[in-house]
Image (cartoon, grey):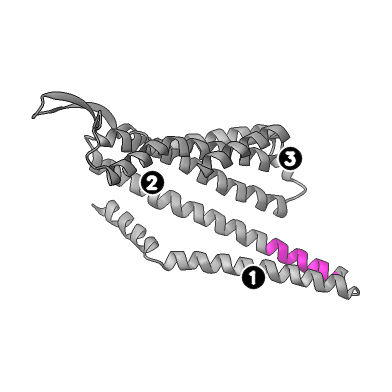
């Protein structure tokens, strides 16, 4: 409920202030994508809750119709939000790294085309598993009554393709891009810090304040890299890499 309220509020606020600049437009698209994810994921979450606490609930169709039919479209919106978040980081990095050329490179037309391209990319990466889940009919032999069900004729092969594309390649490519953005930001801010020190060498108060800001940023950057390397050394990263290698050789 909080996610619905927060994203609807964000959409209203962004529409009122306008979506003319790059960051606001990306945040507006991100809020809309998150809202679509929550909307499509709600039937699956509610079905799992009912299945857990009321296992004998009289379903009008097979339980997996409610759980899986909208699950992968919801995950597609989740991927779209992830792509928008990564591009938002790239935009902020470019604003610091190339401030004079920023407006000429990140134009309104290119921004719209990029958002559409990211959405199509998210859809294309999930098309194999989305098209795999089809709505079919089954007959209960005890009652001779037909009911709707989810049909998955090539589930094993499609799951392998989905794991390679989305759980390995796309995941680590996003992390590499974010690491590159943080590295560029750190280098550019380090250069700016050295330049400011040369200009404020005779002003103790200003120099002390700048040193505090630089140290705070360096600490946050170090913490980010430590957390990322901790994630890379955890069980999830080696498991994903191992599963990818197994899928490629199988």
Tell whether 125 sits left or right of 132: right
User: Which of the two residues, 234 or 184, is positioned nearer the viewer here?
Assistant: 234
Whole-angstrom CA distance, mark 1 to mark 3, is: 33 Å
Q: Residue placed at 29% from the left, 46% from the top?
A: 53
Q: Residue at x 22, y 39 (%)?
A: 56
In contact (CB < 8 Å): disc 1 and disc 2:
no
How many labels were placed on the picture? 3
Left or right placement of residue 176 versus residue 13 in this view: left
Secondary structure found at label 1: helix
Q: Which residue is labeled 1 in the image?
A: 219
In front of the other: 195 or 5: 5
| Residue named by callout 2 | 165
Q: Is residue 105 left or right of residue 76?
A: right
Magenta portion: prevailing SS class: helix
Question: Which of labels 2 and 3 is toward the front?
Answer: 2
User: Which mark is on residue 104?
Assistant: 3
Quadrant in the rendering for residue 219 = bottom right
């Amino acid at each position: 409920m909080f996610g619905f309220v927060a994203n609807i509020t964000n959409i209203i606020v962004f529409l009122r202030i306008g979506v003319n600049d790059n960051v606001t437009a990306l945040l507006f698209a991100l809020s809309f994508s998150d809202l679509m994810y929550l909307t499509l994921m709600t039937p699956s979450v509610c079905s799992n809750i009912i299945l857990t606490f009321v296992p004998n609930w009289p379903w009008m169709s097979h339980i997996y119709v409610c759980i899986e039919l909208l699950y992968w479209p919801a995950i597609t919106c989740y991927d779209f939000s992830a792509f928008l978040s990564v591009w938002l980081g790239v935009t902020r990095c470019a604003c610091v790294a190339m401030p004079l050329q920023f407006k000429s490179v990140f134009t309104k037309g290119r921004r719209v085309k990029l958002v559409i391209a990211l959405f199509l990319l998210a859809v294309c990466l999930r098309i194999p598993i989305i098209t795999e889940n089809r709505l079919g009919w089954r007959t209960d032999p005890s009652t001779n009554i037909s009911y709707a069900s989810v049909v998955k004729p090539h589930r094993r092969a499609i799951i392998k393709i989905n794991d390679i594309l989305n759980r390995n390649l796309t995941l680590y490519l996003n992390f590499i891009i974010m690491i590159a953005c943080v590295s560029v930001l750190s280098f550019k801010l380090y250069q700016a810090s050295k330049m400011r020190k040369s200009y404020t060498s005779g002003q103790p108060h200003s120099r002390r304040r700048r040193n505090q800001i630089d140290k705070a940023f360096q600490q946050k950057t170090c913490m980010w890299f430590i957390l990322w390397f901790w994630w890379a050394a955890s069980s999830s990263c080696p498991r994903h890499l191992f599963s990818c290698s197994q899928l490629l050789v199988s």
